[in-house]
């Protein structure tokens, strides 16, 4: 990075575009500098406050801030390289045992991350304490956070972070996160995240997620892959791919794709593609495409397209289009009619059930409505008897 030649500026001149991203705790400390804190020179900010401020900024924001002036360049550069105060060079020996460092403050965490011989770092704080995770430990030491701490992760971190005991983690861009014991992660933008034992992940815009054992994932807008097992709940999918099994549930699916197998429930499909099989249950389809097979059940279809095959079951169909083949059963809510010429079932004079690609409905499919079967064995038998009477 080339050192800029602009004027030094003030705190407000550099930070004003980003104050909305800062935590209430950071803003409170800035206001404690004085009523006119925005007019102060950046050098007036206590050294230990800068990690809290800069950890809330993404890489583009840091790059822009470094161009404001020489002082800003130095502050960002030291932040990137985790430059430590010269007064402390290492943690006290009584905080390191068998390669495991136990830390209680941001300053101790930075020291441990830069210290040779440290293989793991345990963060233990009071509930609600703010911790800033900057850069990556020199030995790729695993970091374990306990005690309901609030951890903010910078874009420069690329190591291993384990959250325990209801720890709250904000921002994750690189590396691997393992959430246990009701840990919370907000804003997953990259890397790999694992959620176990009622952990929660809120806001997925990138990266890969694997979740088990009653964990929950909220607001997926994009991801390289979401893999959920064993009673996991997913709320709000507007992009990416979700692979679900083991009695997991997906709610409010509006874009992307869901592959459901093994008693998975998907409730609320308005767009995208759902592949439903092996006893999965799909509810409330208003748009998108559902491919249902292998004993899948689709209930409440008002729009979109359902491609049903094998032994799939469709219940309470009021709209959309069903293309059926195999031993599929379809129950239409309302009075349907049969178009004998094309072999289609109509609702309100519009085709609602056809065979694949608009072909005639195969004989193996059963379609019922309020007056009984409109297509199926009973209907075919009565038609055959009528033909015999005519002969």
Image: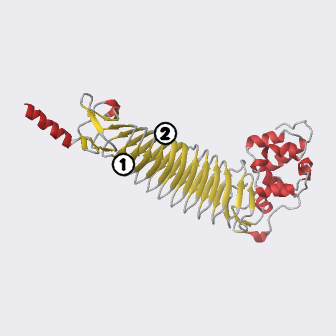
Secondary structure under the numbered disc 1 in the rendered image: loop
Q: Position of residue 369 (x, y in %)?
A: 29, 43
Give the crowd class for mark 2: few <14, some 14-19, many >=20 residues within 10 Å. Answer: many
Q: Position of residue 64 (x, y in %)?
A: 80, 39
Query: Is residue 84 visible in this depiction of the protein?
Result: no
Left/right placement of residue 67 relative to residue 244 reads: right
Q: Position of residue 349 (x, y in %)?
A: 33, 32
126 relative to 267, above or below: below
229 relative to 73, above or below: below
Query: Is residue 60 visible in this depiction of the protein?
Result: yes
Q: Position of residue 155 (x, y in %)?
A: 71, 47
Colouring mode (rainbow / by chain / secondary structure / one colour): secondary structure
Count of picture labels: 2
The residue sitting at the bottom extreme is 94
Residue 272 image label: 2
Residue 384 image label: none
Quick one: quadrant of the N terminus? top right
Left/right placement of residue 275 relative to residue 89 reads: left
Of pointers 2 and 1, the one earlier in the residue sequence: 2
Q: Circle 1 sits on which residue?
A: 296
Contact check, label 2 and label 1, Cβ < 8 Å: no
Secondary structure under the numbered disc 2 in the rendered image: loop
Quick one: quadrant of the C terminus? top left
- Residue 78 versus residue 284: which sits nearer the camera? 284
Give the crowd class for mark 1: few <14, some 14-19, many >=20 residues within 10 Å. Answer: many
Left/right placement of residue 343 relative to residue 229 reads: left
- Residue 143 versus residue 242: which sits nearer the camera? 242
363 relative to 149, above or below: above
| Residue at (26, 36) in percent of width and height | 362
| Residue at (59, 53) in percent of width and height | 193
Q: What distance separates the C-alpha of mark 2 from that of mark 1?
A: 18 Å
């Amino acid at each position: 990075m080339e050192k800029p030649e602009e004027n030094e500026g003030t705190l407000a001149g550099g930070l004003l575009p980003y104050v909305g991203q800062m935590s209430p705790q950071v803003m409170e400390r800035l206001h404690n500098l004085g009523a006119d804190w925005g007019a102060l020179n950046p050098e007036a900010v206590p050294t230990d406050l800068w990690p809290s401020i800069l950890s809330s900024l993404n890489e583009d924001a840091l790059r822009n801030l470094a161009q404001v002036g020489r002082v800003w360049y130095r502050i960002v550069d030291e932040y990137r390289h985790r430059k430590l105060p010269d007064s402390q060079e290492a943690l006290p020996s009584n905080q390191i045992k068998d390669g495991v460092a136990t830390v209680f403050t941001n300053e101790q965490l930075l020291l441990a991350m830069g210290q040779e011989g440290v293989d793991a770092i345990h963060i233990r704080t009071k509930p609600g304490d703010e911790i800033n995770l900057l850069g990556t430990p020199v030995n790729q030491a695993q970091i374990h956070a306990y005690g309901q701490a609030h951890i903010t992760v910078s874009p420069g971190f690329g190591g291993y972070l384990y959250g325990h005991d209801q720890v709250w983690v904000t921002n994750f861009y690189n590396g691997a996160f393992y959430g246990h014991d009701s840990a919370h992660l907000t804003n997953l933008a990259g890397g790999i995240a694992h959620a176990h034992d009622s952990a929660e992940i809120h806001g997925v815009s990138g990266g890969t997620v694997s979740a088990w054992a009653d964990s929950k994932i909220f607001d997926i807008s994009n991801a390289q892959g979401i893999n959920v097992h064993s009673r996991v709940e997913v709320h709000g999918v507007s992009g990416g791919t979700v692979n679900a099994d083991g009695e997991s549930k997906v709610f409010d699916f509006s874009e992307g794709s869901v592959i459901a197998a093994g008693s998975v429930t998907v409730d609320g499909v308005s767009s995208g593609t759902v592949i439903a099989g092996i006893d999965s249950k799909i509810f409330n389809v208003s748009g998108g495409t559902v491919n249902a097979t292998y004993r899948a059940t689709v209930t409440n279809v008002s729009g979109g397209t359902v491609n049903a095959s094998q032994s799939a079951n469709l219940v309470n169909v009021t709209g959309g289009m069903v293309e059926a083949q195999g031993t599929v059963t379809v129950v239409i809510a309302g009075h349907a009619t049969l178009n004998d010429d094309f072999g289609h079932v109509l609702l309100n004079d519009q085709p609602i059930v056809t065979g694949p690609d608009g072909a005639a409905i195969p004989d193996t499919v059963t379609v019922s409505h309020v007056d009984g079967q409109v297509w199926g064995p009973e209907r075919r038998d009565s038609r055959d008897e009528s033909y015999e009477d005519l002969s």
